[in-house]
Amino acid sequence: MDELIDSLCRQGDYMCLNVLVQRDGETVYSKTAGYADREREIPAREDTIFHLYSMSKPVTAAAVMKLWEDGLLDLMDPLTRYLPAFRDQPVREDGRLVPRQGEITIQDLLNMTSGIPYPDGEETPEMSRLFEEAMDKAEGPDAIGTVELANRIAQTPLMFQPGTRWRYGASADILGAVVEVVSGMRFGEYLRRFRPFGSPAAAGAGSDCSGSKPPHSDPVSDGAFLVDGKRG
């Protein structure tokens, strides 16, 4: 196993790999290979911080369920209770915009049945422009925050009526904004408070395997944050 992991990094298939195998709660194999920063030849370590990208979604869901457990929201609550900007969001059907029928619920966001897409070229021109703008501004003083991004998404069309279909999209990004509104905290700060899945903490920025900085300290654009207690 060691040779396979080392060879995958040597060949350039992966910048770095961190492999952990557990059985009955005991670690039976652990191996780290490659670089946390290739340009500076900094090797990856067992505690190297990784940008989670879409694996942040279950952590976001856990944050929402903690708010539910604390009685601070209900899964059948309409999204507009927390983000009123979604009140008049249209739906794109057969190339034209029509009124939305019914509310997006918190459960729709958890299930990705909200109708909110990710950017997908010509199919989602408004969303594509918004995310391009968010990425362009991400490292500057005008970076778009979590709630602002959600409110901007509310001005783009849904892909279908809420609750009628499933589509992978920015629902988790919107849930991050809901967490901020309900908790009164920045998303990363809330995660640090309740430590999902026993993680030491959670934050919105750090270094990924290439040594570069993620684009923003909020779960902007890709819903990503890092499991760690500090900014990288």
Image: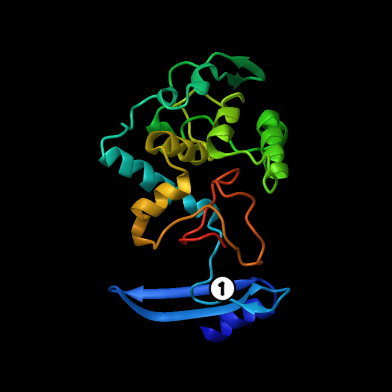
Q: Secondary structure at mark 1?
A: strand
Which quarter of the figure is the C terminus placed in?
A: bottom right
Quarter location, residue 14? bottom right
Does residue 169 appear in this view? no
Quarter location, residue 213? bottom right
Please name the amino acid that badge 1 sits on.
Leu
Q: Residue at x 46, y 45 (%)?
A: 187
Give the side of residue 79 with respect to residue 71, left or right. Answer: right
Q: Residue at x 47, y 62 (%)?
A: 228
Figure label count: 1
Farthest residue to the front: give it.
Answer: 141
Q: Which residue is mark 1?
A: 17
Q: Residue at x 53, y 34 (%)?
A: 147
Of 25 and 67, nearer the camera is 67
Q: In this figure, which colouring scheme has been used for the structure? A: rainbow
Q: Position of residue 199 (x, y in %)?
A: 38, 61
Q: Position of residue 87 (x, y in %)?
A: 49, 18
